[in-house]
Image (cartoon, rainbow, N blue to C red):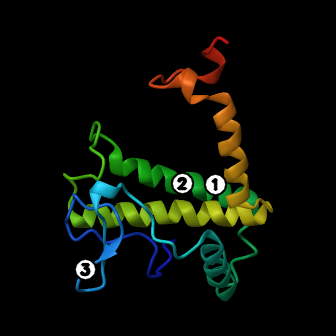
Amino acid sequence: MALQQNGIGSKHNGDTSSHHPSTNGNGEIQHDRAEGFTFTSEPTLEDIRRMQTEFTEERNWSQFHKPRNLLLALVGEVGELAELFQWRGEVQEGLPDWTEPQREHLAQELSDVLIYLVELAEKCHVDLPQAVLRKMALNRLKYPASKVHGSAKKYTEYKD
């Protein structure tokens, strides 16, 4: 259930060194690795929520989009996403060995996951951006940089 909307996902034009948003002469998004990867500012999560609500309502699918069904659909999409990485071993950041069609397939699967996640949050009345802020604050307490720097241990394994 890919949402066809400009701005969701990014076009790389095969330039694997680019990660910071800028546009080329064709108006396509490119990224500059020196600055690190960033997302474009639009659409926002709220924009995505509204677009998906409209998409769902136009098709009279709200009757099917209940929390449990959305969760199961989300899990299915995560499975489809996992298949893209299955049997590849570790892949380098930026996916330099992937073809443009493989990158586009990845963008579509990631978009499906995000769309279902946002819709599930909506149906459960969870303000996802605010929940992320609370969770990041909690993670900072559980994993203080001074204690965990360079370690992959779980927070319960650290001694005070």
Question: What x and y, as percent, mark residue 7?
Answer: 45, 77
Question: What x and y, as percent, mark residue 76?
Answer: 54, 54
143 sits to left or right of 106: right
| Residue position for label 3 | 24
23 sits to left or right of 71: left
Question: What x and y, as percent, mark residue 152?
Answer: 49, 24
Say what secondary structure mark 1 lies in.
Answer: helix
Dividing the picture into quadrants, the one containing residue 104 is bottom left
Q: Which mark is nearer the camera, 3 or 1?
A: 3
Residue flagged by tag 3: what amino acid is it? Answer: Asn
Q: Which mark is nearer the camera, 3 or 2?
A: 3
Q: Residue at x 66, y 84 (%)?
A: 54
Q: Residue at x 73, y 47 (%)?
A: 134
Q: CA distance from mark 3 to mark 1?
A: 39 Å
Label 3 crowd bin: few (<14), some (14–19), many (20+), radius 10 Å? few
Q: Which residue, as the protein is rendered here, is positioned at the far front?
A: 146
- Closer to the chain start, of discs 3 and 1, is 3
Image: 109 above or below 24: above
Q: Residue at x 22, y 85 (%)?
A: 25
- Closer to the chain start, of discs 3 and 2, is 3
Q: CA distance from mark 1 to mark 2?
A: 6 Å
Residue flagged by tag 1: what amino acid is it? Answer: Leu
Image: 45 above or below 81: below
Q: Are marks 1 and 2 in contact (CB under 8 Å)?
A: yes
Say what secondary structure mark 2 lies in.
Answer: helix
Q: Residue at x 30, y 80 (%)?
A: 28
26 sits to left or right of 1: left
Image: 148 above or below 82: above
Q: CA distance from mark 3 to mark 2?
A: 35 Å
| Residue position for label 1 | 72
| Residue position for label 2 | 76
